[in-house]
Amino acid sequence: EAKTGTLTIRGVTEEGDTNEVTHAVTAPVNEVTAVVDPNTTYTINGSDILAVNPEPALLVDNVAVSETSEILLTGKAEETLGLENSDGLTYEFRYLDLVDTANGNTWLTSSQPVTVYWPYPDGTDETTEFRLVHFKGLDREMNVGQIESEINACQAEEITVYKDEHGIYFTTQSFSPFALVYSNPEDITVTFKSGEHGHFAYGYTQRQVELDKGDSLTDSQIPYVFVDEGY
């Protein structure tokens, strides 16, 4: 007997693309990539129905209505990370979802956690500090007029990220928008002040040292401090 059902369509932007899941990462990733255990099974559309012969992939997209959404998501991320502002920080937003490319990109739920590899943004590497915010429940089942209220009401969480030679990675079983947050100064100024960092010899009161990213201070760059000042 035929029954009435509800068809829910989740939209994508023109930049949205799907990347086939893999079982291992052996080289630096060039796109956001999902790594799954070979024994993982999948159910469809949040149900208990097993996907038959699925071809799972990770949908990677920009956030919808990007200018408005990114402003609101940035504010939510600041709140979640305990930041007073985002000066000097860069945000990369991505909407991620597991889908079955063999079944019209129906969305999937995995039986096991998924490891997601995120490429290093230009100018960053393993020495860069990254933080990641997951905006739970912000699936694309809302209209434009609901975006502000949905973002304000969503539960955002910081997810621990790790780094290796292949990229930035984290583990999740829940997908929706994510924000990768990082600072990437090209050079660093170290300022030594007499009185705050001991009392300097030879009469000068302050010294600034310019360092390129990744460099370390040499002995000659560190001011001589009188031993009896405890520095």
Image (spheres, rainbow, N blue to C red):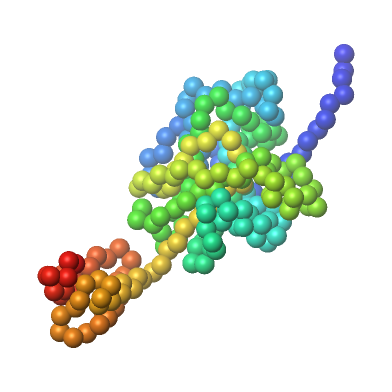
Q: Along the horizontal axis of the image, is 198 left or right of 30?
A: left
Q: Is 104 drawn above or below residue 67 in the view shown?
A: above
Residue 202: give x, y in percent of width and height.
15, 84
Is any atom of residue 14 visible in this view? no
Query: Image quarter for residue 222?
Result: bottom left
Residue farthest along the bottom direction in this orientation: 203
Residue farthest along the front direction in this orientation: 228
Q: How many marks?
A: 0
Residue 49: give x, y in percent of width and height.
68, 20
**The N terminus lies in which quarter of the figure?**
top right
Residue farthest along the left direction in this orientation: 227
The one of 136 and 191 positioned closer to us in this rendering: 191
Q: Along the horizontal axis of the image, is 43 left or right of 202?
A: right
Q: Is 6 drawn above or below residue 147 in the view shown?
A: above
Q: Along the horizontal axis of the image, is 182 left or right of 213?
A: right
Q: Is 50 drawn above or below residue 116 in the view shown?
A: above
Residue drawn at x 58%, y 54% as measured from the top left: 79
Is any atom of residue 113 visible in this view? yes
Residue drawn at x 41%, y 48% as measured from the top left: 167
Residue drawn at x 31%, y 72% as measured from the top left: 190
Residue 195: give x, y in percent of width and height.
25, 76
**The C terminus lies in which quarter of the figure?**
bottom left
The one of 187 and 116 positioned closer to us in this rendering: 187
Residue drawn at x 38%, y 40% as measured from the top left: 26
Q: Is 211 drawn above or below residue 179 in the view shown?
A: below
Residue 60: give x, y in percent of width and height.
59, 46
